Image: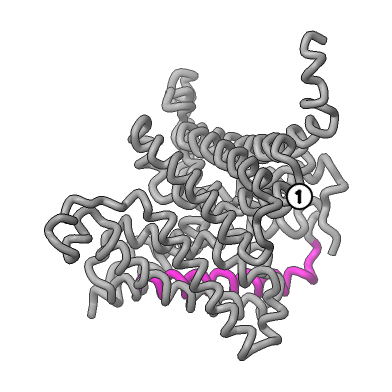
Amino acid sequence: MENLLNIFVKSIFVDNMVFAFFLGMCSYLAVSKTVKTAVGLGVAVVFVLLITVPVDFLIEKYVLKKGALVWLGDGFSGVDLSFLTFMVFIAVIAAMTQLVEMVVEKYSPALYNSLGIFLPLIAVNCAILGASLFMQEREYENVLEATVFGVGSGVGWMLAIVSIAAIREKLRYSNVPDPLKGLGITFILTGLMAIAFMGFMGIKL
Amino acid sequence: MSNQEKEPWFSAKNLKLLTGPFGTNNPITVQVLGICSALAVTVKLKPAIVMALSVTIVTAVSNVVIAALRQYIPDRIRIIVQLVVIATMVILVDQLLKAYAFDVSKQLSVFVGLIITNCIIMGRLEAFAMANKPWPSFIDGLGNGAGYGLILIIVSFFRELLGSGTIFGYPVMEKVGAYSTGYENNGMMILPPMALIVVGLIIWAQRSRDKSLIEKK
């Protein structure tokens, strides 16, 4: 239990997807103009991560790893499909995104319209694939740990996009030098926020 | 001109595709694409250059493939088709890196895989390759990959020089004798936040020079 909590807190604050690894920056920069859409996209990302990371974990464990296919019979013990990792992970993500898109379209047309192109683009949001690849690299032991890591990463990403959206809403009333307007100041702000987040470094429960 | 017969291959329009991404149409600072995997690899010059080369190759080749197939790809499933093409290229690059440059491949860790979701590639496929012939698409891919690489190299140059005092691992600051004058490496530059701030400053510099790029509210 303590271990799970540790993974959760660590993936939100210490290994924050945006501030420590710059993942999902494209939609982070483009959809962070208002808090409302930012929250919507954040929830969608958390949801997609909640499903894809454990699914990818199981696929990795029972299909792709060297010797993972041994449950099919002894003849398969030497099969190593790990070179297919990228292909399989991205396929799972694309399928899940499609699912989320259909659910959102049905239950919240307003959110669907405001997210626009960025909903299908979750499929190419680096944070999603990144979480799966980090999950693979860090060798989590069971599916529960992988799930907690996935949700934590999603929550961390959401935290980042919602806070930058709030800052950008306020920023509209400030006098930023012209060449810095929009993209430039957002980069610098994100940098400053990342410095603040470094304060969490080394926290261990 | 000695290569007169090849002239239309490098017509003014194609050359513009190649050089545009270096300046007014830079994928990172103007189109805001591909920032995701760009910044984390810029602590040192060497991985940054390897990353830039990989992205350029993947962009150019998948642009050609998609441009060649563009009339046969059904509109509804084009994203999946594009992802499959990109993923195949990235797998090739990943396996090559593991075979011939293992240490760099380890440093880049998951970021090689993340080329798949690099928005530059998707963005160029959607915006250019789906509507153009293979050759211009190839040039466009090369240009955008190189424009991306340029920013990566600028950022990593400053981060390596100011953060570790080296260039390509060569201890420049030590040889210049900067340490004896009381100079210290700025450890901050190695940390992730500074990558963002350096890119922010590059954008500032670029937009101050070229006023047409300033965003209107």
Give, as a three-letter code, the residue at label 1. Answer: Ala
Please tell me whether the stretch drawn in magenta is mainly helix, strand or loop: helix
**Left-right relation of A42 to B17:** left
Along the line of sight, which residue is nearer the eye, B78 or B42?
B78
Say whether residue A131 is visible.
yes
**Left-right relation of A95 to A133:** right
Q: Which residue is mark 1?
A: B131
Farthest residue in the left direction? A74
Q: x%, y% of residue B95? A: 38, 40
Along the line of sight, which residue is nearer the eye, B115 or B188?
B115
> The C terminus of chain B lies in which quarter of the figure?
bottom right
Q: Residue at x 41, y 42 (%)?
A: B94
Q: Which range of residues does the magenta coloring cover?
A: A148-175
Q: Residue at x 69, y 50 (%)?
A: B70
Q: In the picture shown, does residue A106 fall above or below A77?
A: below
Q: Residue at x 63, y 60 (%)?
A: B78
Q: Secondary structure at mark 1?
A: helix
Q: In the picture shown, does residue A51 fall above or below A70?
A: below
Classify 10 Å Cα crowding around label 1: few (below 14), some (14-19), many (20 and above).
some
Q: x%, y% of residue A27? A: 62, 64
Q: In the picture shown, does residue A86 fall above or below A99?
A: above
Task: Confirm whether the magenta stretch covers residue A18.
Answer: no
Q: x%, y% of residue A183? A: 71, 56
Q: x%, y% of residue B205? A: 74, 42
Along the line of sight, which residue is nearer the eye, A192 or B62?
B62
Say whether residue A192 is visible.
no
**Left-right relation of B217 to A52:** right
